Amino acid sequence: MKKRLNILCLMVFVVVGISFIPVVYGIAIGFSAGFSADASGNSLNNIDRMVAGEQIVLTPSYLSDLASGTIRNEVTGKETAIWPEHIIVDQAISYPAWYEWTNNICRLLTIVALLVIVVLFLKLIVRVNRGQVFEWNNVRLLRWLGSIELVASIVMTTLQIYGASIANEQFAVKGFAPDYFSYISTMELSVGLVALIVAEIFAVGLKMKEEQELTI
């Protein structure tokens, strides 16, 4: 049982690590494009523009606006129509100073929260491996883990949606509208809620166990 638990926990870390690959890949592609785009040696200007820019996620306002061009099929050599459900635009946006400060601070706090969550998770696994399963300390660990994950996700999602609304006032594309739903961190919210649910299941089981011991 413990071996199976440890394997599942290891899989969790592997999945989390894999989820960072697209982010790292996107950063690498962006910097590569910044260095190679300007052959005249103004790569630093490209990087400044890229870093200062904001990625705005847009979605078609109407289904009729989905068709927006064609791409070449390199296998057959034919052109084929594309219907993008989303487009991502790099655009420099002028944000209020308070928002930039708040956003940067919250990003740093999110990294700290992630480290705390990892520590709590490892601590929980160590306790379970030692046979300390149905204890109130585990309930508290799960509650802290779920609450931190939930609060961090809600704060960052709120900031991103508000930032998208500011960007919408400065940049607009005909036939497209900001896709606010794309900024919602459904995975993080789900993980936080699941941790809280498991904590309450443990709490109910412990209360029932204590009541049975009192009646005996």
Image: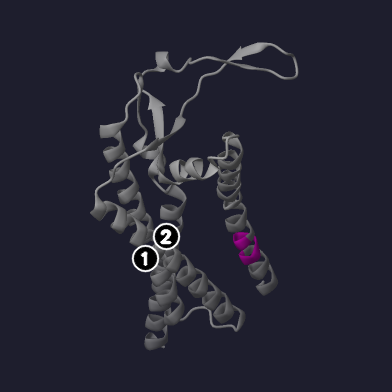
Q: Are marks 2 and 1 in contact (CB under 8 Å)?
A: yes
Q: Is residue 128 above or below residue 214?
A: above
The CA span between labels 2 and 1 is 6 Å
Give the SS element for disc 2: helix
Q: Position of residue 169 (x, y in %)?
A: 25, 33
Query: What secondary structure prevails in the magenta region?
Result: helix
Does 11 appear in magenta? yes
Checking the image for residue 192, the label placed there is 2
Report which residue position mark 1 lands on. 147
Q: Residue at x 34, y 38 (%)?
A: 180
Q: Position of residue 202 (x, y in %)?
A: 44, 71
Does 122 appear in magenta? no
Give the SS element for disc 1: helix
Q: Residues within 10 Å of mark 1 (few under 14, many from 20)?
A: some
The one nearer the camera, 183 or 15, is: 183
The one nearer the camera, 215 or 124, is: 124
For the record, the magenta segment spans: 9-13
Q: Residue at x 57, y 53 (%)?
A: 20
Which amino acid type is shown beneath numbered disc 2? Gly
Picture quarter containing residue 211? bottom left
| 99 relative position to 146: left or right | left
Q: Residues within 10 Å of mark 2 (few under 14, many from 20)?
A: many
Q: For the view shown, which residue lies furthest in the top direction?
A: 78
Q: Position of residue 4 (x, y in %)?
A: 68, 67
Q: Is residue 107 above or below residue 81?
A: below
Screen quadrant of the N terminus: bottom right
